[in-house]
Image (spheres, rainbow, N blue to C red):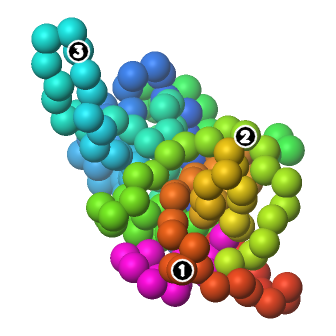
Amino acid sequence: MRPTNPEVKNWYAIYTRSRAEKRVNEDLQQQGIESFLPIQRKLRQWKDRKKWVEVPLISGYCFVNVTRKDYDRVLQNNNVVCYITFEGKAAAIREDQIAAMKRMLQQNDFEVNINRETFAPGKKVEIIQGPLVGLRGELAEIRGKNKFILRIEQIDQSFSIEVPAEHLSALPEEHTLVS
C-alpha cells in the first residue's frame, strides 16, 4: 500500500534485477533513501580454493524505508523491478521485523538460512540466552533438529536459525510474535 501521510516512513520490500541487490542498495543510499540489504558471509568453494564472500540473504530482495515523497523515486532506479505486493498493494513491513532481521545477521554463533518452505504452526518460543535473546518466533522440528523460525509473511519468507533447545522458552498463547 502506498503511504498516505507524506511525512511517515514505512518499510517495503523491493524486487531487484538478478544479481543487482548490492548495486540497488548503493544507488538508493547515494540518493539519500534509507535502504537495508541483508548480507551474510558464506564460505564458497571452487575447484582450486575456498573464499569467504558476502551474499544477499534473500536473493533479489532489498528493503527500503520511505515516505510518500520517496516511494516513486525508488522505482526510478534502473535495477529496481517493483515493490513486493500483497493483495495488490505494496506490502508494508513492520519496523520490528526489520530490526529482528538485523539482529539475526549481527550474531555469529548460529548460521542463518532462508527457507521458502511453509511450516505448520508450531510452538511459540522466545530466545532466552545467547546473542539473539528476546527474539520471538516459532519452533519447528525439521529433520530431527530444533530450528527457530522468524516469518515475514508480507514477502512470503521465513528465516531459520538452529538454536540449542536450552536457549528457548515457550511463550503463552496470547503473545504476539515477531512475524
Judge whether 69 appears above or below 157 on screen: below
Residue identifier under label 1: 166
- From the viewer's perspective, is residue 150 above or below residue 49? below
Q: Position of residue 173 (x, y in %)?
A: 85, 85
Which quadrant, please, contains the C terminus? bottom right
> In which image quadrant can residue 121 be found?
bottom right
Q: Position of residue 29 (x, y in %)?
A: 29, 49
In this view, the residue farthest toward the front is: 144
Q: Residues within 10 Å of mark 2 (few under 14, many from 20)?
A: few
Most common SS among magenta residues: loop
Q: Amino acid at mark 1?
A: Glu
- Disc number lying in front (2 or 3): 3
Q: Is residue 40 left or right of residue 50?
A: right
Element under disc 2: loop
Other-residue count near label 3 (Cα within 10 Å), few / some / many at <14 / 14–19 / ≥20: few
Residue 48 location (% of width, % of height):
13, 11
The amino acid pointed to by label 3 is Trp
The residue where tag 2 is placed is 117
- Circle on res. 30: none
